[in-house]
Amino acid sequence: MKLRPYADADESAVVELWRRCELTRPWNDPHKDIQRKLTTQAELFLVGELAGTVVATVMAGYDGHRGWVNYLAVAPEHRTRGYGRLLMRHVEELLAARGCPKLNLQVRTGNTAVLEFYRRIGYSADDVASLGKRLIPDLPPR
C-alpha cells in the first residue's frame, strides 16, 4: 500500500470508504470534517492506495500537548493485511518527530474488534471519561 497526503480529488472516495467502514454518523458531515482538517495540519491527513484506489485513511493532529487520531479506516476487503498497523506506525512517527509525547484516540465502546486492534498495537484504555460539546452543528436544527 502506498501512503500519501490527502488530495482534493480523493474526497468522494474517502467519504465512501468512511461510510463502508461505518465511521460516519448523521450528526457529523464527513465533507465538513475533511474541509476542517484541511485548515489545520493538512499534511497529517493521509490516504493509502492500492493500484490507484483509496483503500485506507488516517487523520491525525498535534495540539502541542497530545496527538490525536481520527478516521482510521481500512476497506473491509483489505483488512488483516497490516494496513491499519502501517498507518498508525507512520502517524506515530510523524507525531513523535513533532515532539508529541502521547497519542490519544477514541473508539466507540461497543466496537470490540477495533478496540482489540488497538490493544494489539500497544494502546490501552486510560482511566478517563470522554466528554464532548458541539460548538458548530453540522446539521441545521429541526
Image: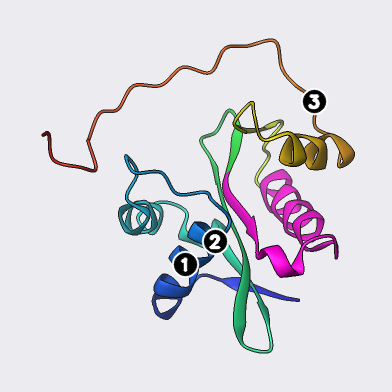
Q: Nearer the viewer, mark 3 or mark 2?
A: 2
Quarter of the image that includes the N terminus:
bottom right
Q: CA distance from mark 3 to mark 1?
A: 29 Å
Q: Position of residue 28 (x, y in %)?
A: 35, 44
The boundaries of the magenta stretch are 70-97
- Return the residue at label 2: 20
| Amino acid type assigned to the residue bearing label 2 in the image | Arg
Could you tell me the amino acid type at mark 1?
A: Glu
Residue drawn 80% across the image and 32% down it:
123
In the rendered image, which quarter contains the C terminus?
A: top left
Q: Amino acid at mark 3?
A: Ser
Q: Residue at x 71, y 31 (%)?
A: 101
Residue under circle 3?
Answer: 124
Neighbours of disc 3 within 10 Å: few (<14), some (14-19), many (20+): few
Q: What residue appears at the point 80 percent right and 25 percent down from the top-left corner?
A: 124
Pick the residue in front: 107 or 142.
Answer: 142
* Residue for badge 1: 16
Does the residue at mark 3 contact the one at mark 2 (Cβ under 8 Å)?
no
Kind of element beneath mark 3:
loop
Asked whether 9 falls inside the magenta stretch, the response is no
